[in-house]
Image (cartoon, grey):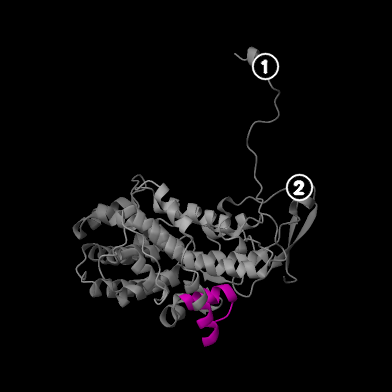
Amino acid sequence: MSDKTFELVNPETGKKTALPVHEGSMGPGSIGVTGLFKEQGVFTYDPGFAATSSCKSAITFIDGQEGVLMYRGYPIEQLAGKSNFIEVAYLLLYGELPDKSSLAGFDEQIRYHTMINESLLRFFNGFHYDAHPMAMVSSVICSMSAFYHDSTDIRNANHRETFAHRIIAKIPTIAAAAYKHSQGQPFIYPSNDLDYCSNLLRMFFAVPCESYEVNPVAARALDLLFILHADHEQNASTSTVRIAGSSDSNPYAAIAAGVSSLWGPAHGGANEAVLKMLNEIGSTKNIPKFVARAKDKQDPFRLMGFGHRVYKNYDPRATLIREMCHKVLEELGSANEPLLELAMALEEVALEDEYFVKRNLYPNVDFYSGIIYKALGIPTSMFTVMFAIARTVGWVAHWQESLEDPDRRIGRPRQVYIGPTKRDYVELSQRG
């Protein structure tokens, strides 16, 4: 916290309140308002917390104006080009890039924990065949606290680390089980000789009656997607995990809460919405008509996958994922994929159209990720689950950080009450 302060003067009473400024290592500072109610008798009002800092964090930095995203100080472009998901997971959890020995040990721990308890696996048979995969995933994750008692004491450092390794390792197995259940296929157990993403692809697409070889381009594409989605500062689901954890809930319940928050179409379902939009447009010849509809405020149609609440410039993740999108479609024999052709044409129009340029409506990561998932054979119902697998690492990192925050308090936002003023109860017999 710097010596800089803002002074608030109550126009009615003339009372002054000094508001300290909390400075970060990068980005704008935040005005401390915790004493405002005590001294002035008012709360702050900020719907959606768009201008409110709920915590101090050393994990992820975003500069939306410049299109910058960094994990622990490392630019996402460098991590995406030189690292892999497991190394990025270590970085987010422990704060530094690992040496060879530490990385090998961490990777070994993740592989060790990939299987889930057989009783948990049988849970899936209790779900209807067409249950949404996110319903199954959130339910099973929450149930893990009833099975893994050696990782639920949040005040025990060993428990916290075991939980971190366990949830990161098991969520691909849980996701794959949800997919297999929806397909009516037998569950495929993890194979710990494979890397994280190759193992996931095998659990998704292998069947007992045939051999299955993981395509390395597909595995690398998935690894890149997971790196890009691993964390994104105080988004809705991450904030949910922090608030759920602030009540000292067991960690599995906190992560399950994050999964439920991510399930919302305005958050984790954006890439699925992009595919639906592209299918609705149908052909490149229809682009002008739909672009005109997007500009019409009276028309409910919206171009999905353009613009971002945080980024007011080009989403740095979109540049990286766009290149991978081409590689995947070329490798998997889908170079003439109609949806990609349509997406590229739509992107070109939007980047040159003054309406979109003026409003900084650049393509974001969701614009391309759904196309890659589709090319890999992953159904749209599983898109948000894939997002959850990647984001689990960020959720765990933030949950751990929040437990060690000296300013930690149970989350308890305030409100502006707009209901009826005091009124007296009227007996039922006297009501008209």
Determine crowd level at label 2: few under 14, some 14-19, many 20+ residues with C-alpha closer than 10 A: few
Expressed as whole percent of the image width and height from the top left, the position of residue 418 reads 63, 37
Q: Is residue 69 above or below residue 304?
A: below
Q: Is residue 233 visible?
A: no
In whole angstroms, how far apart are the C-alphas of marks 1 and 2?
36 Å
Quadrant assignment for the N terminus: bottom right
> On the image, which quarter does residue 210 sit in?
bottom left
Horizontal and vertical percent for residue 119? Answer: 48, 55
Quadrant (top left, top right, bottom left, bottom right) of the C terminus: top right
Above or below, 22 against 253 in this view is below
Relative to 214, is 143 above or below? above
Judging depth in this view, the residue of 215 and 33 nearest the camera is 215
Location of mark 2 (residue): 41
Identified at 52% across, 70% down, the residue is 63
In the image, what residue type sits under mark 2?
Gly
Closest to the observer: 241 or 115? 115
Q: What residue appears at the point 31 percent right and 65 percent down from the top-left corner?
A: 205
* Amino acid at dot 1: Glu
Number of marks present in the image shown: 2
First of labels 1, 2 by sequence position? 2
The overriding secondary structure of the stretch rendered in magenta is helix
- Position above or below: 393 against 186: below
Q: Mark 1 falls on what kind of element?
A: loop
Residue 234 placement, left or right of 204: right
Quarter-of-image position of residue 274: bottom left
Crowd tier of the residue under label 1, counting other residues whose Cα lies within 10 Å: few below 14, some 14–19, many 20 or above: few
> Which of labels 1 and 2 is toward the front?
1
Q: Position of residue 156 (x, y in %)?
A: 68, 66
Magenta range is 86-107
In magenta segment, residue 44: no
Instruction: Give the secondary structure at mark 2.
Output: loop
State the residue position of label 1: 427
